[in-house]
Amino acid sequence: KQEVTQIPAALSVPEGENLVLNCSFTDSAIYNLQWFRQDPGKGLTSLLLIQSSQREQTSGRLNASLDKSSGRSTLYIAASQPGDSATYLCAAALGTGNQFYFGTGTSLTVIP
Amino acid sequence: GAVVSQHPSWVICKSGTSVKIECRSLDFQATTMFWYRQFPKQSLMLMATSNEGSKATYEQGVEKDKFLINHASLTLSTLTVTSAHPEDSSFYICSASLQAEEQFFGPGTRLTVL
């Protein structure tokens, strides 16, 4: 079974700072990896999806990388804004069944 | 992106009653739907995987007789929590995917069992 861990569990940064969120997974045979944000009491918003054959994906101020051999993915957020405050989850999908195994999440607070 | 809806968005019920939650893919046909559960301050835990027209596959530790999943069509899956108890109170989220590609998540259903 896939184990997914995220570090740090919580992060507080001043507005404008660049930051990196880390995700590690135990089974390198992933099908894809996806990053989400979740606002309190809300569902998930998909941010970036990286297929197993890709090394990174970019969307606006967000960049996600994937290193299957080391079992790691990172989410880079540039020029952070207070609206970025949320919990960020990574999820690794195994095989064609595409079951997602979620990380423990990083709670981000961007201070104005 | 594709849209997945859930109904209801929240429900409060008495202990011992059954609650049905619907998950619909609105603009695509989902070959596979997933059900997750999220307890407060915890991450999402996969409960089961359902493919249209076949029995759901449950994760270890999830009681299949308590959490009944029906995937009767390519756009609808239902999760029924039978004989609900307070410990079943949680945030239930479904997702839908088409041919093992990106998953699209519903907005979630908050269940409170009194």
Image: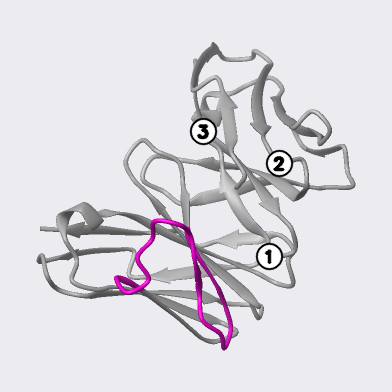
**What mark, if any, has residue A105 been given in the picture?**
3
Side of B69 relative to A27 (left or right): left
Q: Quadrant location of residue B36? A: bottom left
Chain where mark 1 sits: A
Q: Which of disc 1 and disc 2 is earlier in sequence?
A: 2
- The residue that label 2 is drawn on is A27
How far apart marks 3 and 1 lie (CA) works out to 23 Å
Q: Is residue B44 above or below residue B13?
A: above
How far apart marks 2 and 3 lie (CA) works out to 18 Å
* Circle 3: element type: loop
* Circle 1: element type: loop
Q: Is residue B108 magenta?
A: no
The mark lying in front, picked from 2 and 3, is: 2
Residue A85 place in picture, x, y as percent: 50, 28
Side of B77 relative to B91 (left or right): right
Quadrant containing the C terminus of chain B in the rendered view: bottom left
Q: Quadrant location of residue B98? A: bottom right
Q: Which of disc 3 and disc 2 is earlier in sequence?
A: 2
Identity of the amino acid at label 2?
Asp
Write the residue at 67% across / 35% down: A25
Residue A14 place in picture, x, y as percent: 55, 11
- The front one of A16 and B33 is B33
Looking at the rendering, the stretch of residues picked out in magenta corresponds to B47-67
- The residue that label 1 is drawn on is A97
Residue B6 place in picture, x, y as percent: 43, 69
